Amino acid sequence: MSLISSLSQAMTGLARSAKAAELVAENIANANKAGYAKRSLSLHGQTHGQDGLGINAIVRQDNGLLLGEHQLAAGDRAYAKLKAGFYNAMRLTFGDVGSTSTLEASLNKLEADLRIASVDPSDENRLASAFHAAQSVVQIFNKTGAAIQKQRELADHSLRQDISLINQTLSQLETVNQKLSRTAPLSSQQAGLRDQQDLLLQDLAQFLPFKQIERAHGAVALYTVKGQILLDSHATELAISETGFGQNWPPPPAVQSTQLQIKTGEGWQPIRPISGAGSLSATQDISLKWAPNLQAQTDQLAFKLSQIFSSLTEDTSLHGDNPGLFTDLGGRINADRLEGLASRLQINAGVNPDQGGQIWRMRDGVYAEHPAEDISGALLAEMADQLSMSQALDGNPSTSIIKDAQMITAQAHRLTNQAEENLVTQQAYLTLTETALAAHSVDTDIELQELLQIETAFAANAKMLQTVDEMMQEILRIGR
């Protein structure tokens, strides 16, 4: 080997060792940084008469398969967390089975107080207890309806926040794509931009699932699972229809269809349904499925209660369309306007002392003009019987209203347990993917071992350079 060749190899080796040491230092410094992937050198044989191995590129060692699994797991966990949170809030609203704060317990107490009052209908204290029990039933219906509506409003607000963050993330990804197109491939700058890209994709995955396609220079194109473009050259924009609830109850019919829109080259179009993954899907399901289902069941129960007390044979004061003991904001309950009825349920003003009514009308008739001379507990007894009597309504199975209330409470608990079990499963899988990613991330022990090897190689090349220098000095000395 000639001195020139030896000198060339030594110089190349020193440069290679210096760059390798720089990458090791960078790897160690960023070992705990989110989104950072290990860097290493890609080497190639020299050409044009040069000797040794040259630096070809800086390789970013990521694992696309694991990253994809982690993104899916993050979306599934976000969906499961919101679902569990919603049903847990509903469980607290409906109360614990067997507690005194449930609809079932309040109806049971109303039945008991009505029976007690029917035994001695002249006892004003017993009548007052029955009235207050009826008020308690109304208050629990109102509280339950308001709590469900609140969850829908919170979901509507969260949906708007998600849309804003999705649009922001897509815009940032568009910027990263543009920077990548102007960056040298397989360079330190490109590796840094890919780190940023992975973090943004991870953020996006928590909102909605997407398909990812690699473009030139490391850029990405993103599509919804239904094939609508999210990002390709330019970021699209998502928006939500203005169907907020506010003071409008029931919600407008538009809320029963898709609320999301996506801006394409042809203008705004409805986004195709996304279900089962990501917070965007969960907030939609709360607003459009889970909360309305519970609301409908609660409203139907309130309707059944009003119907029971509007068709009492012992109340001869009831005529025509006059509402019974339970009203819709004072009026008769319309079967075509049940949405939100639980929130609007009220005691008939004719019975309510706070509205100028008289409690004795519970005993003598809701629209009785004067207390009965011949006091009877028959109406009170019929009310109590109706609460525990099985009866069908609008084609539903024949059950008592107390049993219906018990079933709704039990359902809320069952759905909560299922949602929480699913959350545990999804969290465990997310943790598993995080552990797998950590195993493929920077290992500082290995990096330190590589640093020792680099030090050895650097020393060897430095020694060769020193030897070549000594030989050249000797040649020069001989030539003088």
Image (spheres, rainbow, N blue to C red):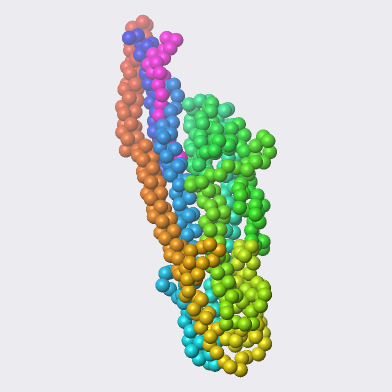
Which stretch is magenta? 34-54
The quadrant of the rendering that contains the N terminus is top left
At 55% from the left edge and 35% from the top edge, which residue is drawn? 227
State the image coordinates of residue 233 (x, y, percent, origin top left). Answer: 60, 31
**Outermost residue toward the bottom in this view:** 373
**Residue sticking out furthest to the top:** 479
- For residue 167, say whether it is visible: yes
Any part of residue 472 in sight:
no
| Residue 46, magenta (yes or no) | yes
Above or below residue 60? Residue 282 is below
Residue 159 image point, x, y percent = 58, 51
The structure residue drawn at horizontal position 40% and vertical position 21%, both measured from the top left corner, is 43
The relative height of residue 212 versus residue 401 in the rendered view (above or below) is above
In this view of the protein, which residue sits in the foreground, 95 or 58? 95
Give whichever of 110, 209 is nearer the camera: 110
For image coordinates 48% across by 50% down, the residue present is 79
Name above or below for residue 364 compared with residue 304: below
Query: Which residue is at 52% across, 56% downward?
Result: 290
Q: Name the foreground residue: 178 vs 235.
A: 235
Estimate the x, y position of residue 296 in percent, counting from the top left.
55, 61
Observer-nearest of 438 and 356: 356
Q: Residue furthest right?
A: 267
Q: Residue 107 placed where, x, y %? A: 49, 75
- Residue 304 among magenta residues: no
